[in-house]
Amino acid sequence: MYGTPDLPPDFVSLPYANPDAPKGGRIVLGNTGGFDSLNPFVRKGTPPWQLRFFAYESLMGRSWDEPFTLYGLLAESIEVGANREWVEYTLRPEARFSDGSPVTVEDVIWSYEVLGTQGHPRYHGLRSQIETIEQTGPRSLRLTFNTADRELALIAGLRPILKKAQWDGIDFAEAALDTIPIGSAPYSVSRYEAGRYVILTRNPDYWGKDLPLRRGTHNLDEIRIDFFGDNSVLFEAFKAGNLTVLREFNAEKWDSQYDFPAVQRGDVVKSEIPHSKPSGMTGFVLNTRRAPFDNLDVRDALIHAFNFEFINDTFTGGAQPRITSYFSNSELAMQSGAATGRVAELLAPFTGTLPPDALDGYALPQGDGSARNRVNLRKATDLFERAGWTVQNGVLRNAQGAAFSFTILLKQGDTESQSIAELYVSALARLGIQADIETVDNAQFTGRTTEFDFDMTSFRRELSLSPGNEQRFYWGSANADAPGSRNLMGMKSPAADAMIDVLLTSESRDDFVAAARALDRVLTTGRYVIPFWQFTVGRIAHVRELRFPDRLPVYGDGPNFMPEVWWYDPS
């Protein structure tokens, strides 16, 4: 995205992959809930989230040891215009789909078109920014953009490429469970039982196994994904040896509950994977499309009522630091105190539409760690009063006498969020608020959040060291009311839109960082999410036969680390 790639043209493998890793073995992962789709590229249904990472490829591939750098995958070469107003890709002649048929320019053009029109909404934004797609040679095509956006040449290189001929006479968006898109990746679905398990098998004749980008990756012969009712059942399955690996997101549980016999014998190993990526945002998101969550003071009051210090101590032993902003834990995070320099300059035109502390400085409220959280609850009461809500006979009501009540929508298997919500509901009751917790299965949860049918719900957005076009889908005004948008909070902020524009047109790293810090201020002071704790290290428990390289990527753990660069060593 900026500067030059770290790796030379003759690189042997990614720096965090072992080019000599042996092939073989299997890994068994666990998911909660179920699935009713094996097409991860459409809105319909709930597919296993891992599929689009394991079973499909794009023209270019990422190095997760750089903020945003791509190397050739299906494409053997890339050309761009002087201002990246167009990009041209040339396909590798040896590129093949999993059924052995060649990947053609026709397949690529069709993939851009069908994903951009019939696919999941996350793919629509790019298509709307492409003026033309045309074949320029037997193995080459050019995309010309209608928007000044330097990231588009990279984003286009990351679109999944599917086989056009498979879909003759089949509705791509409405296909049945057994119509699984054909990709070109090392893995494809070989067996499944609806709602229970999916098995992906490595193709020994995979076309790209000798590419530098692929050496030392995709080493396991089989990836199995089993499905469980909730996290508690999943954990017991891991302890019993039914799973071979488990990611743990709770530091207190990691320290206190991973001492079962297999760990004591050394058959299960606990590995910690540090990273340098932003914290992202995890918490409860408020739907600002609905009153009273459209009121900033109400959102601020609800954040004050959330007793983070007590809840964090209860669930993690206080071991995990709080998320302080969307890009915290990185150089892209908003700085403490008043905005200065380029950040202040970028935000100045929007002074009238932003909370004053967006420019003056903001920090999340801090409690004293006690269960009562008296100081912050008093502040919450003051904020509610300023918004027109007062306690009448023990119930918080507005001037029309309507009671303040809402529902927190959660997945059935998300036991940790349910436990956090229970503590939060108790605190809200002391303010005269009636809050209820509603748990639904995965399919209902996806459907409800897709249509924004919730008051408050669980929220997680991972953010990279090179935020770009995905920011429009996360927070942009244009997508705020589009079903399936990831802008769950429904924010419509001219300042956020403008900061995203600067991110996408910056030609210097300094300007890019300033735009990210300014965007972070807009998001954080908008009080759209009640933040939880951040995950400063990845925690993976696994059978001792599963190994990974000593050299770790800057992004740490993720599907492109585990299982992509892991291998099985029976010795």
Image: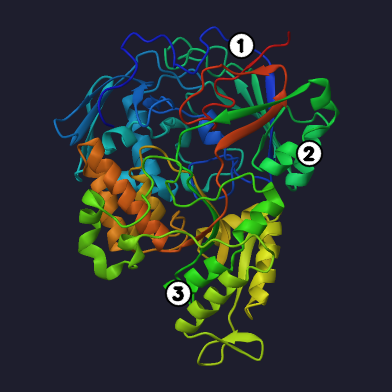
Q: CA distance from mark 1 to mark 3?
A: 57 Å
Residue drawn at 54 percent across, 69 percent down: 302
Would you say 420 lies left or right of 293 here? right
Decide if residue 481 is in sight here: no
Q: Quadrant of the N terminus?
A: top left
Q: Which residue is mark 1?
A: 23
| Colouring mode (rainbow / by chain / secondary structure / one colour) | rainbow
Q: Which mark is residue 297?
A: 3
**Amino acid type of disc 2?**
Gln
Residue with the mark numbered 2:
257
Whether label 2 touches label 1, CB < 8 Å = no
The CA distance from mark 2 to mark 3 is 40 Å
The mark lying in front, picked from 2 and 1, is 2
Q: Residues within 10 Å of mark 3 (few under 14, many from 20)?
A: many
N-terminal of the two: label 1 or label 3?
1
Q: Quadrant of residue 360?
A: bottom left
Q: Mark 2 or mark 1: which comes first in sequence?
A: 1
x and y, in percent, of residue 125 in the image: 33, 48
Q: Is residue 556 left or right of residue 33?
A: left
- Kind of residue sitting beneath label 1: Lys
Q: Which label number is shown at residue 104? A: none
Q: Is residue 391 or residue 570 the one in the foreground?
A: 391
Q: Nearer the viewer, residue 363 or 557?
A: 363
Q: How many marks?
A: 3
CB-based contact (under 8 Å), mark 1 and mark 3:
no
